[in-house]
Amino acid sequence: DIQMTQSPSSLSASVGDSVTITCRTSQSISSYLNWYQQSPGKAPKLLIFEASTLQSGVPSRFTGSGSGTDFTLTINSLQPEDFATYYCQQSYTTPPAFGQGTKVEIK
Amino acid sequence: ELQLVQSGAEVKKPGESLKISCKGSGDRFSSYWIAWVRQMPGKGLEWMGVIYAGDSETKYSPAFEGQVTISADKSISTAYLQWSSLKASDTAMYYCARPRPGFHYYYGLDVWGQGTTVTVSS
């Protein structure tokens, strides 16, 4: 199975800041990487698929990049609704494992 | 547009059986894969397995193979997740979700149910 490692596990930021979350995989997955946002008490929401393609309706302040084994999710100009937990997931092979999550908290 | 509505919260005792459901809206349910994802209290997301609603072909994560059964009834646009003998460690939130249509069953999950909380306690 492909192992997923996200960092950091949590971070504190202020409204208006930019933050970057990293996801590393144990083997190359080309660009088959998804990012999800989970707000407290809610189901996850797909933000980005294929490393950099924004899901319909997702604000452009969310940017994904990377290929191979190293990927990043950047959130520019954090908004109050962006304080949530973010997960990466590989879609290269089954089982499609998730990272352990990064909690973005208000400073 | 597909919407997934899950059955309500369950409280069970160890050893009991359980079947939770995920009902899809719309008339294309039988052309979709439906996945199940576990989230234990305070923990991350775990992909459990998936079923093709059209012919009930199933794929399981090795971690969940033999621990749960995924099934579907396309005539009522519903997928199921069931346990024959629950353990306390099955306490979790369970989500159903649709892999992006037209791609492999392990692709990104673009439509999610609201989740079903399962609590197993004596």
Image: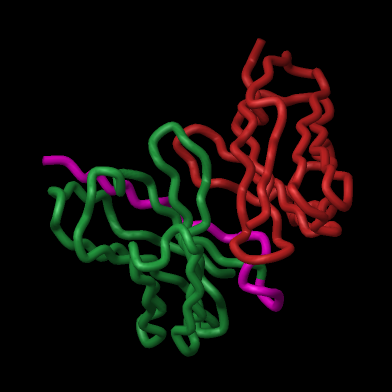
Specify the color scheme.
by chain
Identify the residue at image location x=52%, y=40%: B44
Query: Residue visible at 38% across and 79% down?
Result: B72
Say whether residue A18 is left or right of residue B79: right
Q: Nearer the viewer, residue B102 or A72?
A: A72
Image colour assigned to chain A: red
Considering depth in this image, is A9 or B75 the residue closer to the camera? A9
| Position of the C terminus of chain B by quadrant | top left
Residue A30: image quadrant is bottom right
Residue B90 is situated, as x and y percent measured from the top left of the image, at 30, 49
Q: Which residues are magenta?
A: B101-122
| B2 sits left or right of A104 in the view | left
| Vertical position of residue A95 compared to residue A23: above or below | below
Coordinates of residue A63 in the picture (x, y in percent)? 84, 41
Residue A78 occupies quadrant: top right
Expressed as whole percent of the image width and height from the top left, the position of residue B21 reads 33, 66
Q: Nearer the viewer, residue B3 or B18?
A: B18
Give chain B's shade.
Answer: green
Q: Is residue B116 magenta?
A: yes
* Position of the N terminus of chain B by quadrant: bottom right
Task: Find residue A98 and report its horizontal and vertical position in percent.
Answer: 61, 48
Q: Would you say residue A106 sits in the magenta stretch?
A: no
- Up-down relation of residue B46 to residue B41 (above or below): below
Q: Is residue B115 left or right of residue A40?
A: left
